[in-house]
Image (spheres, coloured by chain):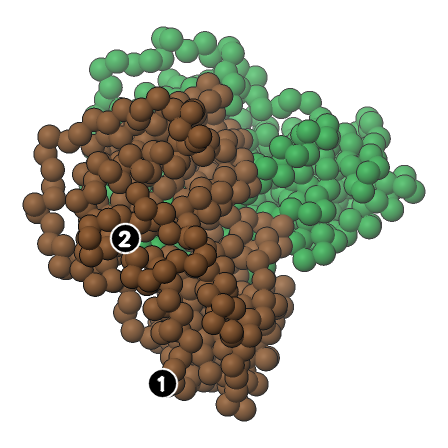
Chain colours: A brown, B green
Amino acid sequence: MTQSLLQDIKVTKTENSKISQVDFNNLSFGSTFSDHMLVCDYKNGTWEAPEVIPYQPISLDPSSKIFHYGQSIFEGMKAYKDENGDVFLFRPLDNFKRLNISAKRLAIPELPEAFFMEGLKTLLEVDKNWIPTTQGSSLYIRPFVFASGKGFHASPADAYKFIIATAPSGSYFAGKVKVLIEEKYSRSANGGVGYAKAGGNYAGQFYPTQLAVAKGYNQVIWTDDNKHEYIEEAGAMNIFVRINDSLLTAPTNDRILDGITRKSIIEIAKQEGINVEVRPISVTEVVNAAKNGSLKEMFGAGTAAVISPISVFGYQGTDYTLPELDNDYASSLKKRITDIQYNRSEDPFGWRIKL
Amino acid sequence: MTQSLLQDIKVTKTENSKISQVDFNNLSFGSTFSDHMLVCDYKNGTWEAPEVIPYQPISLDPSSKIFHYGQSIFEGMKAYKDENGDVFLFRPLDNFKRLNISAKRLAIPELPEAFFMEGLKTLLEVDKNWIPTTQGSSLYIRPFVFASGKGFHASPADAYKFIIATAPSGSYFAGKVKVLIEEKYSRSANGGVGYAKAGGNYAGQFYPTQLAVAKGYNQVIWTDDNKHEYIEEAGAMNIFVRINDSLLTAPTNDRILDGITRKSIIEIAKQEGINVEVRPISVTEVVNAAKNGSLKEMFGAGTAAVISPISVFGYQGTDYTLPELDNDYASSLKKRITDIQYNRSEDPFGWRIKL
């Protein structure tokens, strides 16, 4: 049905594949790029037909609004290959829907569903051999849209580019992280763009994160910008806190991204019989729980790392160490979600899509 | 002294000047670009020597971080030509300093002063004939820096481009504007990047502005993101309010840009003997002043439009009309600042720099 908007997507294959130069056993995250990309231009008030072309540089006028006014949005997804060589996506329609939610907030024209979904499938078919198969690896998929239209006037552009590029990536896991609960800097405003996957949300995090790194932490836990009373996100991930046997996460709002890993974790945890509370989590509550021993776990959740467990959090000059558990939620929830993603288990939720 | 860092800047002139194709009597704002641009690359931990080259497209890898994580900052300045053909800049060192303040907050490497100042002067020397001379026109100057480094990892780039492009522009004045005091959306967070001239700050304004335009307004007056109690900026400009004979403007903070036109207006007004109050301005105060007749003027202040007078403001469904005055501050302050900029008067402040 979604195909009705499209003729077949035009594919121009590269004559110089780079695939033989890639060591698929030693992939870092998002730094090796596949042979092709999907490109789609918005001009004269409409999105033109997408095409698959060789991965290549983009040429832009110096006045293109992406350089000046930050109109850029993106998504992060993965393609997984199972033992039989079949390829799977995880809730891709949710990425498409969120891209258009971001588009609306950033005054970027929304994309037709078929251009995204069929474009993605065509690209993955062409670059199927780029999907790695070593433990924990996947093809990281980066759909993004930016303002290519020209002019120094501070107004929405009249031209945009939608691109999907992919990067075979190894397991992101890099051990547990030390985090700092932020008391000065903020990620997003009430009534701002924090719920959108907009480029500017990330650029603003780098400097406060550098300051935290200089103090010996890996990452910042973002709090509300008003009084820094509530914890909201962990770096570029959503945050979960386990107090006793309850799993807590902040509700989505206009400051917090509606993470696909986040909402999947919530559903899996509920199915496992875990008491899940989606509500504001105060810093005071977390500190008190750490002091009285009821704080069992904290972890970030996002597409790239899936689940990123926290070993220590710092707040007002004190470091609080999380316990080492035998049966932690982080490990069991990560296993459940990745088993679904890699087609190693049943998918009772209907999230997995075979290519 | 600033020249000591530099050998002469290398200049490569175009063989195909576009200048004969430009109608200098009918210039819009920021949509015609001069023949040359200054480019400067940051690589391997250092800013390389700037060069002047023909204005031309920029080629970037699809994974360049500008497309994904919003690391971009800019400045807005003008070059003015007087009756004798001499060229002047207005407080250019302040633009340079602010660019580096923005750079720091966006985790972009700071620029050497000489690269900016001598680069700018060299570029203007080369494109001197592009500076228009009709009433109210000027050469709009756009210095900008963005992340060109590659990779999908959400971290600061390892390569950047600093570019100065210029655009001969006509007078920006387009009559008085109707503005809407914003009650839902916000421009910036406490602890955020609102004080930086970062691309993302502008992209986030487009959608709320479109909603205001659909209601019949030209622009949004931004308020604090917490309770929308205080007025902070007018569109992409700073805001001034005249109550009786006092001129009020919000203090700069981490949400408000330290505008060069704003601070020049403050100094000129003080020299004129006007009572200037730099303090938070509540919406309630402005509404009450409109009701009791003490609200005399409201205007935006910024480089592009200099001063943009407001005719009407809307708040909670009511429109409040500003009076028409014979001796308004907006006109006299605009005349004073532009007379200094165009070398039509003395410059007691030492702001004007002859090229």
Residue B237 visible to an observer of this rendering? yes
Taking the image as shown, residue A244 lies to the left or right of residue A148, namely right
Q: Nearer the viewer, residue B141 or A10?
A: A10
Residue that sits furthest to the right in the current view: B292
Q: Nearer the viewer, residue A304 or A343?
A: A343
Answer with left or right where residue A246 lies relative to residue B271.
Answer: left
Check if mark 2 and mark 1 are on a common chain. yes
Label 1 residue SS: loop
* Total numbered labels: 2
C-alpha distance separating marks 2 and 1: 28 Å
Which residue is label 1 attached to?
Answer: A326
Looking at the image, tell me whether mark 2 or mark 1 is earlier in sequence order: 2
Crowding at dot 2, Cα within 10 Å, few <14 / some 14-19 / many 20+, comes out as many
Asked if residue B135 is positioned above or below residue A228 in the image, the reply reads above
Q: Are marks 2 and 1 in contact (CB under 8 Å)?
A: no
Tell me, yes or no, if residue B168 can be seen here. no
- Which residue is drawn at the image coordinates 46% and 47% (left, top)? A94
Quarter the C terminus of chain A occupies: top left
Quick check: A279 above or below A312?
A: above
Secondary element under disc 2, as helix, strand or loop, is strand
For disc 2, the marked residue is A80
Residue visible at 38% across and 85% down?
A: A325
The three-letter code of the residue at mark 2 reads Tyr
Q: Position of residue A195 (x, y in %)?
A: 53, 51
